[in-house]
Amino acid sequence: MVPQIIDITQESFDNLKTSGKTKNVAIMREIQVVNGEVIGRLFFGEKFLEYQIEGIPVSKFIADIFASIGIEAKSASFLLFGPKFWETGILAKQRDLQRRFKLYRSQVSEIIRKRMEEIAANKKAGKQPTGFKTMLDYFQEMREEGSEYALNDKEILDTIGSFFHAGVDNVGHTAAESTYCLIHEADDKFRELFR
């Protein structure tokens, strides 16, 4: 997976450079999207690039949701009234976040269902996975073996959510802060990578 991480990172920075938006880059956001794409490919493989929700790549859509949840968890209304207040959906931003979260869960659930069926059909037809084995390949093997640790689709969705949250939040923040420090403390050769 390390070569894929390098490729995804390089691809993301190349896309950023060709977009012409290299001034005032929200580096944390960009790294969160990179992390989301890495996690997506870990679970779904190269096909993850094909999936979108509301015209937005899934990794970016999920990164936005988790960033919004983090912001909401620090809001005055959440701190004063707690999660039950958020669940009421009184405020428009709460309703929108709930809508996007439900949409993410339903869309990714459908992707999981289709990919698991595709993996099972390919295996039945004797086709080997192309590229590297994904987490869904392993989950399907566990199901076929009748393992007591086999996950159902909802548990897979929750696992993917956990990976995304950890990758987008913790790893994304750490990598962004490191990149920021490197850019401001680095020599001209390193800075040239981001121009």
Image (spheres, rainbow, N blue to C red):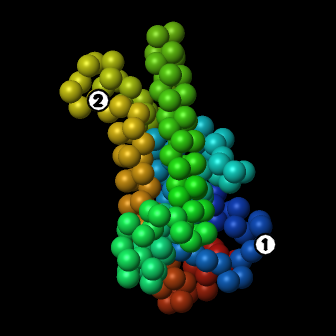
Q: State the residue at coordinates (38%, 46%).
A: 158
Q: Is residue 65 above or below residue 45?
A: below
Q: State the residue at coordinates (42%, 47%).
A: 160
Direction from residue 23 to residue 40 in the image, left or right: left
Q: Amino acid at mark 2?
A: Ala
Who is closer to the viewer here, 13 or 92?
Answer: 92
Q: Which residue is mark 2?
A: 150
Q: Is residue 95 above or below residue 173?
A: above
Is residue 112 in sight in this rendering?
yes
| Pointer 2 with pointer 1, Cβ within 8 A | no
Q: Quadrant of residue 191?
A: bottom right
Q: Quadrant of residue 14?
A: bottom right
Q: Amino acid at mark 1?
A: Gly
> Label 2: few (<14), some or many (≥20) within 10 Å?
some
Direction from residue 142 to residue 70 in the image, left or right: right
- Location of residue 142 in the rendering, given as x and y in whole percent from the top left corner: 30, 26
Q: Which residue is mark 1?
A: 20
Q: Compute the Cα span from label 2 to label 1.
A: 46 Å
